[in-house]
Amino acid sequence: MSIHKLVRTAAVALCTAFAIAPLVSHAQNAKPGVLVSGDNLPTNIDPHQIFDVPMMLYSLNAYDNLYRYEGNPPKLEPWLAESHTVSTDGLTWEFKLRAGAKFHDGSDITAEDVVYSFRRVLAVGKAPSGAFKPVLKSENVTAPDKSTVRFVLDKAYAPFLSAIPIVAVVNPRLIKAQEKGDDWGQSWLASNAAGSGAYQLDPATYRPLERVDLKRFAGHFKGWGDNPKAPELVQILPTRETSTRVLGLLQGSVDLTDSYLPTDQVERIQKTAGVHIQKDTSMRVFTLRMNNKKAPFDNINARKCFAHAFNYDGFIKEILKGYAERNPAPMPNNLWGYPADVKGYDYDLKKAKEFCDKAKAEGAPIGRPIQIHIQSQLEQTNQAAQLLQSDLAQIGINLKIVSDTWANITTNTAKAETSPDLWVHWVSTYFVDPENWVGQMYDSQFHGTWKASSWYQNAKVDELLRKARTTVAQAERQPLYEEATRLIVADSPDIWVYNTVELRGVTNRVKGFRFSPVGSGGEMRWIQLQ
Amino acid sequence: MTTGARAGGTASILEARDLEVLLGGRQRFLGTAVPPVRAVAGVSLTLAAGETLGLVGESGCGKTTLGRVLLGIQRESAGEVLLDGRIVSGMDRADARKSRNAIQYVHQDAGAALDPWWSIGGILDEGLRVHGLGDAVARHERIDRMLGAVGLDASFRLRYVHELSGGQLRRVALARILLLEPRIVILDEPTSGLDLSVQATVLRLIQDLKARLGLTYLLISHDLSVVQRICDRVAIMYLGRIVEIGPAAQVFAAPRHPYTRTLLAAAPRLVPGHEMPGANLIIGDPPSARHLPPGCAFHPRCAFGESKCTEAVPRLEAAGAVHEVACRRWRAIDVVPVSI
Amino acid sequence: MLRFILRRLLLVMPSLLGLLVLTFILIRLVPADPAAALAGENATPAQIAEIRRQYGLDQPVHVQFVRYLGQIARLDFGESAYSRRPIALEISQRLPATLELTICALLFGIAVGIPLGTIAALYHNRWPDTVLRIISVGGVAIAAFWFAIELQMLFSMKLGWLPLRGRLDAGITPPSPITGMLLIDSLLTGRLDVLRNALWHLTLPALTLSLGGIATITRFTRAGVLDTLQKDFVTYERAQGYPAGALIWKFVLRNSIVAAITQIGLLFGSLIAGAVVVETIFDWPGVGFYTVQAILTADTKVMLAVTLLIGVIYAVVNILVDVVHGLVDPRLREQD
Amino acid sequence: MSEVQKANADEPLLEVRNLRLSVRTDEGKAQILDHVALTLPRGRILGVVGESGCGKSTLARAILGIVPKAATVESGEIRLEGRNLLALSDRTMTREIRGRRIGFIPQDPYLALNPVFKIGAQLLPLLTWHAPELKTAADRRARLTNLLRRVQIPEPEAVLERYPHQFSGGQRQRLMIAAALAANPSLVIADEPTTALDVTTQKQILGLLKELTVEFNLSMLFVTHDFGVVAELCDEITVMYAGQTVEAGQTAKVLTAPQHPYTTALLACHPDRSDALTGIPGLVPSPLQAPPGCRFAPRCGAVADVCSRRSPKLVGIAGDHFVSCRLADETRSATP
Amino acid sequence: MLVLKKFAKDKPAVLGAFIVLIVVVVAIFAPLLAPYPGDAAASHLLLRLKPPSAAHPFGTDNLGRDILSRVILGSRGALAIALLVVGTAMLIGVPLGLIAGYSRGWLSETNMRITDVFLAVPQLILALAIAQLMGPSLQSAMLALTLTYWPFFTRIVYAEARRLSASLFIDALQCIGAGTTRILFLHVLPNCISPVIVRATIGMGFTILVAAVLGFLGMGATPPDPDWGLAISESRQYLPEAWWFSTFPGLAIFLTVLGFNLLGDGLRDIVDPRLRRSR
C-alpha cells in the first residue's frame, strides 16, 4: 500500500490541527477611560459579611461610610457625615449627615439608612461587627432626626470612631426587597450592590473572585469636579500568580497590580518603560506567631531564643531587597502609641543558643520537632519559615514547615491545643488605632480569635489595654499603649519582623494614585487616566 | 422412559435418565428477558463398561453440554445420572464432581486447558496432589510412568505448554487425567485441529490406553470417519436430543434417521470421485437451539418430513436389537444402504 | 436504544449515591471549620457557634447527609459559604468554560492522535513508530503544570505571542452568554473579534491539556490499528483488491476506533481532572479553578457539588461511550 | 473469442514456477516456500493439500500478492493469463488483479467480513473499483443482488442493508462467494473455505462451488487439508510438504496410487483408509532449519543417503502425474 | 530467553529501563552525588537566584540553594512515594480484584461498585480533598494517592480474573476437582500478575506525576523538602527571569516518569499474552 500517500494525508491533518491555533501578535489593549486593576477580590461582595483587605478595596469604591481614612499616615476625614460629637463619658456618639448624598438608585441617604446599615452589620454578626458587638446593641443605634445618627455604647470604647469606616452604608430599600426570611438580604447582597459609592457595580458581569466591573457614578455626593479624568470603568481582574499579574502590567493589559508585589518582581517593573513602582510605607506588620501556651514556647527563654534566631536584616535586605522597614514590636512604627525607645531583638545565633540552653536547662522541650505553619499561597511566609528553619538547624533545633491554608489555620487557632506552634502572617490595618494591633493581639479576652493566637497572657498588659480601650482622649491612651507594648516586647510572645513597604506596579497612564494603609490605596476616584 | 440401548449384555457403569439442561436465561434489568436455551432435552443413555460410545452431532447440538453434565461440572435441570447404579445427580457442583471422580474429561483444546505458567511436571503433579494420591516420591514415579505410557518421556516434566506441539499437548492432557485413575473418560473432540498424521497417532494412543487400562470412553466428535473407526456404539444428536443410537457398524451401514443419513451423506470421504447419494437431502442451515421448531426439530430440513412431524416430538424406539431411532417415519423411508 | 440509555442511567444511580456518601464522609472529616471561616476574622466563639447552628453544622452527620440528599433531589446544592451565591448558579456559569476547554483539547487530541497512531501502526517497529511511541509516552510523562509554565514562559513572557491567562482580554466585553462557550457564542452573535481573542486565549491551555490526550489517543489508535490489521477481514479486503487508502482510512480505522472510543471516554474524565491544574495556572474561570478554590477554603458544599458533578459527567460520558460504541459497532447495538 | 485468446486456450490459466519465499523472524530466516510449482488449467479445480505449516496458505497469498511485510519472494514466477504477477507493482495488483482477475474466498467467513459495515457498504465498492463497466450505482446493485440470488441468499435487496453478524456461517460463506465472483474473475482462490462450517453446510457450499465453476467458466485454486473434500471436489491435486511441492496430478490418480512416500504415508493415516493408525514418525521440520536435500527424508520410510544430499526435482511420471522424489527419478532413469 | 531478546530489540523500552536504572542509582547515592548535600535544608541568602554556572550547573533557587543538589536529593522522595504508594495500592487492590473477579454475586458486585465509586472521581480531585482533610503534608499526600490508586489494580485484576475464570485451564482444574483457594492463588494470581506489573510500573511514573501536582498545589511535600513539584511551584514567582528554577526540576520529573512509562509500555508488549503464547 502506498505509505507515502498516507504520510502525506496525515501531515495535512496535522497542519490543519495546528492551524487552529492562531498565532496572531498580541495587541496592546489599554482602552481610554477603562482602568484594569489586578487586585484581589473578596470572596463575596457584601461589605457587611466580609471584612478584609480585598473587601476594603471594593467597598471603598462601591460604598460610602460616615467617616473615611485618607492619606498616609491615614487621617480620619468626614465623608457621609459632616461632623460628630461625643459625650464626655464616651458613651453617646452623634453623627451629623451631610445633605444631598444619594444612593445609586437616586434615593436620598437618610439617618434611617445609616441606622439600618449598622443594625444589619450587628445582625449579620460577621467580621465587620467584631469591633462593635462588645459595646453596641442594635437598639442603641437610632436616628433622632433625618440627618442625625446616635449611638449609645454600653461602655466607653475609645476605638469606636476609628472603627466607624468599617461600616458601609447600604440602601435598605433595595435590600429589603430581596430578603429571604431573616437573612437581611445576605444572599442577594453577596453578589449585588446597594450603595452610594463613587463607582457602581454592574452585577451582570460579576464573577466571584474573578471579575468585578465598576462604572463611574456621576451622581456621587463628592462630585467629580476635582477629577475630570477619573476612570469611567474600573475592572478588577484578580490574577492568582504574581508573575502573571506583573506580566499583564508589562504588556499593558493591567493598569495596577496589587500592592503586595514581591521584590523580585519590582526590579522587572523598574527595568521596563511605561510602568513604574508606587512605593508606600504602610501599617502592616509581618509576624511569626508563637503559641505561648504550648511547650517550649511557654518558656520565655525559648521564645527569646527564636526571636534571636531570625535573620531580620538578611530577610529584609536580601529577600525583600530592602523594601521594608524593620519593625521590632507588634505595633507599626508609624502609628501613635508605638514606643520609640523599644529595641526589640536582633539576629544573633550566639545569643539564641544561650537562651536555648537556658530554656533547655529549665526543662523546655527544645529538642522536639517544632512545626511552623505557612500559608501555601503566600510565598513570603514560606521564605521566612525556611530562613528561620535553616538558622535554627545550626543551633540544633528541628523546625518543620507545614503548608496550610488561611481557613485551616484560623479554625485551629480557636483552641490553644490546636493552634500551631508557630505560624506566619501579616497584621494589616483594619482601623487605625493601636487596638487593631496590641489591643486585639495581646489582650487575653480575645483568646480564641486568630489575632490573639499567641495565647499571650499578662495581667498587667490586660489591665493597661483595657484601660486604654475605655479612655477617650488619645493623649491619655498613648502612654498606656506604649507601656503595654514595652511589656509585651520584653516577654517576646511573637517574632515581629518588619513594617511593610507596599509596592504596586502601575502603568504610566495612571496618575494621582493616592495610597492609604487602609484599603491599600484602593480608592479609584482619585486616579486620573492619561 | 425408554429402556436405553445397551451394548449386548455388558453391565452399564454410567447411566443417564431423561437428562435436561437449560442454559443461560435471565431477566435483565429493564431489558428484554432472555429465555433459557434447552441445550439437552430428555436424553437417556447408558455406557457399558469397556465400550467406546461415540456422540456425534453438528456444532451447537448439545453434545459437549451433555458430556459436562455427565462429568458433574454442569448441573442438570432435570433427570438423573447413575454411576455404578448409584444416583449421583441432584447435588451441587462440588459434590457432584466429587462423587464422580471415576469420570474424567479431556478438553477439546488441550493447549488452552493447561496453565501456561506451570511446567508439565507441575501440572501432572497437581492432579495427584488435589486427590491426595501418594507422597512426593511415589507421585514422581507415577508421573514418569504415565509420561512413558502416553508416549512422552521424563524430560517433558520441565517443559512448558508453549514449547509443546499439538499432539504432545493431547498426550499431556490424557496423562493428567489418567493419573487420576478414572474408569470413564469423556473425550471431547480429541483430534480436532490436529493434522492427519498426528490425529492417527493420537487415536492409536487412545485405543491403546483403553485396552491397557480397561477404560470406558464417551467420545464426543463431529468427525464421522474418526467415530466410525474407533467407536463401538454411536449416538447421533440433533438439537439437544439423541435421534439415533446403535452399534457403529449398523448405524453407518444402515442409518435409520433422516438426519443420520444426511450427516453420513454430507461427510466427505476419501473415495476419489465418489459422489454420495442424498446430497439433495439437506435443506437450509441448522436452526438455533434458541428457536426450536415444534415437533421433530429436524422436520424443516428433512426431505421426508410431513405435516404430522410438527405435532409431537418423536421418542426413541427400537429399530433393531440394540438400535433405536427417534423418527415417526423411519419405517416408511426407503432404506438406502450407504456405501463407504 | 432509549431503553438502553435509561437502564444505564438507573444502573449508574447506586454508584453516584456511593460517590456522594464517600465524598460527604471525607469532607465532614475536614478539620477546617467552615463556620469559623464564615464568621470572619474577629468572630468570637459564641458567634461561631451561632453560625454553626444557623447552617445546621451542629447536627449529627447522618442528619446533615439526609438533608443534603433531599436538597440534591431538588437540584439545590445550597449556597457557597463564601460567595453566598447558589452553587448551581456558580457551576452553571463556570461549566461552559471548562467544557469549552476540555472539548477543544479533546478534539485537538483526536485530530492529532488518530492520524499519528495510525501512522505508528502502519510503520510498526520501524523508526516512525519508535519515535512516535517515545513521543506519545512522553506526552503522558510530562507534568502538565510544568509544561504549562514553560509554555507561558516561552510564548507569553519571552515572545509575547500568546496571552498568559484568562478567556478574553480585559476590556473586551463578551457577548451575553447563550451557551456560555465563547467560541460558539461569538459565532452566533457574529462577534469575530471575540472569537479571535477567545481562540487566542484558548491556545495554550488547550494545548497543555490536550498533551496527555494526544499521547493516549495515539497509543490506543496504534494498538487498535495494529490489532485490526491482524484481523482476517483485513487480509480478505486486501485480497479482494480494496485500495490502500480506503482500506486504512475507512475500513480499518473505523474498526480500530471502536477500541479507542472507550479510551476517549475515559480521557474526557481525566481531562476534566487535568483542567483543575491547567485552569489554576491559566486563571481559566472554569469548574477546575472553582474546585481548587473550594478545596483551599474548605467550602464543603461546593466540594460535594463539584465531586457529584464530575461523577455525573463521568457517568454521562460512559453512557455516551456506550451509545457511540453501538453506533460504530452494530453487534453491540443488538445486545440490548 | 479473439485470436490471441484462442491461441492461449491450451496454456494453463495459472502457472507457478520455482517459487521461493522466506520470512524474516526474530530467530532468523524461515524458508516458507521452496521451489514450489503448480499448474492450473483453465476451467479446472485444483486442490492444494498439505498439513498445517506446509505453506499452502502462504502460496495462496503469494499469488494474490498479499504476503506479510516480513516476507520476501526470493525467486520464481507466477503467471496468470500470461502475466507474471511478481513483476507487477502493488498498485497494479490492487487495480487490475486482486478482486478483478482473481476472486478470493477466505477460510473463516465469521472473521472475514468487517463487522462494523453493512454488507452493501462492504461489497458494492468492490464493483466501483473492479467492474468499471457498470456505470451507475443501480447497475452495481443489480449485479450484486443477482449474484446473491444465484448463491441462494434469500431477499438479496434487504441483505445489503444488514450487518455480517446477522447471518449464519453458511450464508456468510455464500456472501463471500458472491463477492469473489462480483467482478467476473477468471480465477478464484479458496483458502479452506469450509473448515469452519458444519458438514451439512460444507456439503452445500462445495456443491455450489462446483456448479459456479462451470457456470462462470472459472478456474479454482482450492486450498485445503482435507483429502475427503479434495476427493469430492477437485479435478487436480497438488500435495505440499514443508514448503515444497511433493506430488501433483489428477485427483483420482494421486489418491488411488500415490507415488511420493509422504503422500502414501499421509493417506494411510486417514481413518477411512488405515486400520493400523500408524501415523508418520517425527515432526514436520521447522522452516528455520529445513533439512538439506529432501525435506521429508528424516521421516521417510524409503530414505536413502542421496536424499539428504540432493533436493529432488519435480518430474513427470506417467503423463501429467508429477512427483518430487528420488524414487521417481530412479524409476524414470531406470526406464528410459 | 526469547522474552529478554524481544525486550532488547524494543529500543524505547531499553531506554526506559536505562533511565529507571539511573534514577534508582541516583536516589540510592543521592547524598554522595549531590554537590551540596546540605542544601536540602540550608539557605544562602547571598546566592539567591543565580543562573547556571560551573559552581551551580542548574543555578540556585530563591533561597540560594543549589538546584542540581536539590534535584538529585529530590529523586529519593519521589521514588519513595511512588514505591510506597504503588506497593500499598497493590496490596489492597490485587486481593480485592481476585476475589471480585473469581466470585459471583453480591460479594463481587459490592466490591466492584465500591471500586467504581472510587474510579468515578478523578484521582487528582479526590487526592486533593483527602490531602486537605488530613492537613497538607507528604504523608497525607501518600495516603491520598494510595486511597485513589488501589482501584486501578482491582479493576485490572478483576478483568483478568474474570477472563481467566472463564478460561479452559481453570475449567480443567475444576474438572479434576481442584479447590477454589488452590485455583485462585496458584493459577489465577500468577496468570494475572503480568498486567499488574505493567500497571505498577506505569503507576510508579503516574504517582510521581500526581505527587508533583499535589506538591505544586501546596497539598503535598512541604518546604524545605527538595521536592520537584514544590520547587516548580516556588519558582513561579521568579519567572521568566529565573527560568532554570522551574526548568530543571520539571525535566527531572519528565525524565523519571518517561523512564517508568517507557519501561511499562515495553513490558506491556512483552507480557501481552498473545505474544507469550505464540510459539
Image (cartoon, coloured by chain):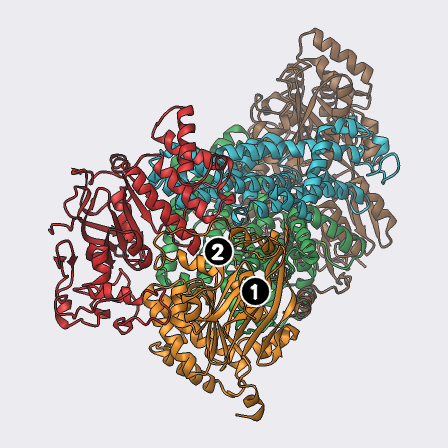
Chain colours: A brown, B red, C green, D orange, E cyan
**Camera-nearest residue between D64 and E146:** D64
Q: Quadrant of the N terminus of chain E?
A: top right
What amino acid is found at the position of numbered circle 2 in the picture?
A: Val
Chain letter of disc 2 in the image? C
Dot 2: what SS? helix
What amino acid is found at the position of numbered circle 1 in the picture?
A: Asp
Residue A472: x and y in percent read 67, 28
Q: Which residue is mark 2?
A: C317
User: Which numbered disc, 1 or 2, marks the residue closer to the eye?
Assistant: 1
Residue B37: x and y in percent read 26, 56
**The image quarter in which residue A308 lies:** top right
Above/below status of A418 relative to A63: above
Left or right: D147 as drawn, with respect to B38:
right
Is residue E50 at all visible to an observer of this figure?
A: yes
Residue E100: x and y in percent read 40, 39
Name the residue at the top extreme: A361
Above/below status of C45 relative to E162: above
Dot 1: what SS? helix
Label 2 crowd (10 A; few <14 / some 14-19 / many >=20): some
Left or right: A166 as drawn, with respect to B305:
right
Chain letter of disc 1 in the image? D
Residue C21: x and y in percent read 42, 40
Residue at (66, 74) in percent of width and height: D87
Residue at (71, 40) in percent of width and height: E19
Is residue A512 at all visible to an observer of this figure?
A: no
**Camera-nearest residue between C78 and A370:** A370
Q: Which residue is mark 1?
A: D329
Label 1 crowd (10 A; few <14 / some 14-19 / many >=20): some
Q: CA distance from mark 1 to mark 2?
A: 72 Å
Disc number for residue C330: none
